[in-house]
Image (cartoon, rainbow, N blue to C red):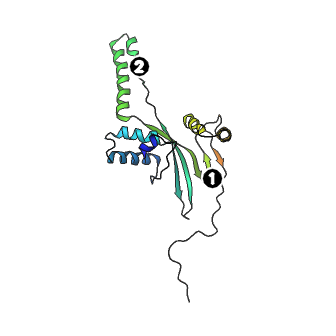
């Protein structure tokens, strides 16, 4: 599935049973390791993260009604060369060592504990309403627009402007119809009737 999503497809849909987004990434990474496709955890996880743009998480309430609980965006963290060469400007040996150890600390953080992705919910279902939370990244917005005709792209841009505009962290409520069936559907045997 990961390989298919990496080449020759505009999008890939699949189902999973992970409860959280990090659990989904871990499960897919472990599957790739288990089948021998990769032998390095970070490399396998990096491949997974490059494919997962959005996770649409469905859940079922106690009545058996399914709904979208949240939509989560996966944002790969690009590796940046954050080393500096300020040690050359230091006059004292102590100053040079301090700058060197700053770079060494950055290096070891990258090697041992490098974050490959961040994730954030862009929509959540709370108390019967969908709440628009975080904006979609510009990269995903651009890719989404590229797959729309002009009319759809204009409507999409109006939606983005309405909900995120310049207020990137403003949470807004979107009304939703939560009409429940009059009587929840019951499963199992029919109750015995007294004759």
Residue at image point 63% right, 63% down = 180
Rate crowding at label 2 as few (under 14), some (14 to 19) or many (20 or more) other CA atoms within 10 Å: few
- Alpha-carbon span between mark 2 and mark 1: 48 Å
Q: In the rendered view, would you say 25 is above or below 67?
A: above
Rate crowding at label 1 as few (under 14), some (14 to 19) or many (20 or more) other CA atoms within 10 Å: some
Q: Which mark is residue 71?
A: none
Element at label 2 = loop
Residue lying farthest to the top in this orientation: 91
Residue at image point 49% right, 46% down = 12
Element at label 1 = strand
Image coordinates for residue 195, horizontal then vertical, percent: 56, 89
Residue 86 appears left or right of 138: left
Q: Which residue is under mark 1?
A: 129
User: In front here: 99 or 188?
Assistant: 188
Is label 2 in contact with label 1 (beta carbons under 8 Å)? Answer: no
User: In front here: 77 or 90?
Assistant: 77
Q: In the rendered view, would you say 1 is above or below 186?
A: above
Residue 168 appears left or right of 31: right
Image coordinates for residue 15, horizontal then vertical, percent: 47, 53
Residue lying farthest to the bottom in this orientation: 195
Q: Which residue is under mark 2?
A: 84
Residue 89 appears left or right of 73: left
Tag count in the figure? 2
Looking at the image, is mark 2 or mark 1 earlier in the sequence? Answer: 2
Residue at image point 55% right, 47% down = 71
Image coordinates for residue 179, horizontal then vertical, percent: 65, 61
Image coordinates for residue 171, horizontal then vertical, percent: 62, 43
């Amino acid at each position: 599935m990961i390989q298919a999503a990496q080449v020759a497809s505009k999008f890939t849909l699949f189902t999973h049973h992970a409860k959280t987004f990090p659990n989904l990434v871990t499960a897919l990474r472990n599957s790739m390791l288990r089948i021998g496709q990769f032998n390095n955890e970070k490399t396998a996880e990096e491949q997974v993260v490059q494919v997962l743009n959005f996770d649409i998480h469905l859940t079922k309430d106690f009545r058996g009604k399914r709904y979208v609980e949240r939509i989560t965006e996966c944002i790969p963290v690009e590796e940046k060369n954050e080393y500096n060469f300020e040690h050359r400007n230091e006059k004292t040996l102590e100053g040079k060592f301090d700058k060197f150890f700053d770079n060494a600390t950055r290096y070891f953080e990258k090697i041992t504990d490098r974050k490959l992705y961040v994730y954030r919910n862009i929509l959540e279902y709370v108390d019967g309403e969908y709440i628009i939370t975080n904006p979609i990244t510009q990269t995903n917005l651009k890719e989404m627009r590229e797959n729309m005709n002009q009319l759809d792209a204009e409507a999409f841009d109006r939606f983005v402007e309405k909900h995120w505009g310049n207020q990137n962290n403003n949470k807004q409520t979107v009304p939703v119809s939560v009409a429940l069936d009059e009587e929840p559907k019951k499963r199992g045997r029919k109750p015995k009737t007294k004759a």
